[in-house]
Amino acid sequence: MSINEKDELLYNMENRDVETPQPRVKRGGVHRPFLFGFATALCLVYLMDLGFEAYKFATLRETVQVASGELQTSWPPPPPYTEVARVARYVVHISDWASLATISTAAPIKGFPFANTASVSDGPVGLSSGTPYFYISNLDFTGKDLLTDARTTVSLSEAQSDYCHTSGFDPEDPRCARILLSGSIVEVKNGTEEATFARTALFSRHPVMKTWPIGHHFFFAKLNISHIYVLDFFGGASDVSVQDYYKATPFP
Amino acid sequence: MSINEKDELLYNMENRDVETPQPRVKRGGVHRPFLFGFATALCLVYLMDLGFEAYKFATLRETVQVASGELQTSWPPPPPYTEVARVARYVVHISDWASLATISTAAPIKGFPFANTASVSDGPVGLSSGTPYFYISNLDFTGKDLLTDARTTVSLSEAQSDYCHTSGFDPEDPRCARILLSGSIVEVKNGTEEATFARTALFSRHPVMKTWPIGHHFFFAKLNISHIYVLDFFGGASDVSVQDYYKATPFP
């Protein structure tokens, strides 16, 4: 190769882009700006998703979900555990169901302590009365038992909401609050103002009750509370006076 | 305008792209292929999201979620309501907590029917024994009551899973199954094979139990089942014999 030939080769190498320009925006058949646009959209979607997750996490800690059939209600978190009467009112108000303890009158287990699931409401959402109302039929175990002995304990556990789960509290952890209301179940007389309240309290939160068969003779009933135990922290249960209970409010 | 001028104008209009070519891929400062790429990515993400939602909806109907503290377990849906013994075994196995009914010995409510929340397990996930095990302390209401009268009813409601909610069943709807196991609570003697099973059953599903204070003298206990009621459909409760219950399996 002569010096001239070398020079020409170098010249050609340095200037090859000028002489035979490459296609500017092609790469493997796809436009480079197209790829940039694609990547930008993916990044934006990813960032939006991150933001949405952060928002969900932030709100998750601020609402307590309770589900009752097709209804789901979001509640504020519970009051501090030191405000025991308020905790009791809170758990009673957010609860959609409770265990009703009775002394069984059913032949095979006559005299046994018994507990049954009952849908409950102390008022429409946000309008807490503190008094648990039920819609009872004497065809049911509980209704039959109460005819013989009206004493009961209404046992309500915060485990029915998602609060204990999202807080990592086992159902038996005392911080997963338990409210134990003892007293007697009494019928709410039809036609009274209280019957109207009980109907609104129950039917607003358990709409299916409106359709329950007339032949089962359901009636509105309430718990006349005589004693209250609350377990909402380590160190054993607290007694709450009925007066303090009714004076307290579930929400600030 | 002379004919020559007109001709020149036409010539210029026809040939303006040749003479002063427009930027090929610009529009409002953004490359058109970039926009195409962006839109394609958004469409793909949207389609992926649709597919994910469809998948979630399909699986939602096929699993039942039960939460116990920090653990959450996915279960297959319940057996048909006609297979009553299997429904009983199913609800007992998926349940993480139950109501334990006792006759109260606490001074202010002595003799009252009482019910308390108790964490329960009849076996580690997928290994159902049918026997409900508990970890009991005699410092607790329930433990104290059982020392005087060991009879109890263990009341379990499907309402603690998300099955009733996603199916639109109110907690008191009989299709939101209730299992009512009556019998006596007996201690499981330490050092036996059954104590090992009870420990695995409870500690696997309630890990916090491992850390419960030694000073509270917790012991493993089980329900000796003497009678079973199941409410899983309209038309009243079914009796299930203890033999049929233990023969049945919760899953196909």
Image (cartoon, coloured by chain):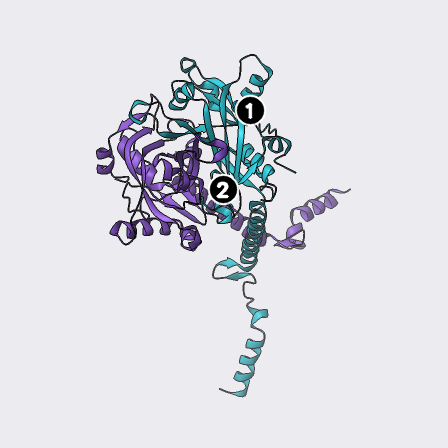
Chain colours: A purple, B cyan
Residue A171 in view, yes or no: no
Q: Residue A67 location, x and y as percent? A: 43, 44
The amino acid pointed to by label 2 is Asp
Q: Residue A237 location, x and y as percent? A: 32, 25
Q: Residue A17 location, x and y as percent? A: 64, 51
Q: Please state which of residues A59 and B78 is positioned toward the viewer in this rendering.
A: B78
The amino acid pointed to by label 1 is Ala
Question: Given the image, what chain letter belongs to the residue carrying mark 1?
Answer: B
- 10 Å crowding of disc 1: few (<14), some (14-19), many (20+): many
Could you say which disc has been placed on residue A13 in the image?
none
Give the residue displayed 57% in from the left and 63% down from the top.
B24
Up/down of B1 relative to A247, above or below:
below
The residue beneath circle 2 is B162
Question: Given the image, what chain letter belongs to the residue carrying mark 2?
Answer: B
Secondary structure beneath dot 1 equals: helix
Direction from residue A241 to residue A58 in the image, left or right: right
Quadrant hosting residue A142: top left
Residue A44 in view, yes or no: yes
Secondary structure beneath dot 2 equals: loop
Q: Residue A46 location, x and y as percent? A: 50, 45
The residue beneath circle 1 is B201
> Is the C terminus of chain A in the top left, top right, bottom left or bottom right quadrant?
top left
Q: Please state which of residues B54 and A223 is positioned toward the viewer in this rendering.
A: A223
Question: CB atoms at circles 1 and 2 under 8 Å apart?
Answer: no
Quadrant hosting residue A176: top left
Q: Are marks 1 and 2 on the same chain?
A: yes
- 10 Å crowding of disc 2: few (<14), some (14-19), many (20+): some
> Is the N terminus of chain A in the top left, top right, bottom left or bottom right quadrant?
top right
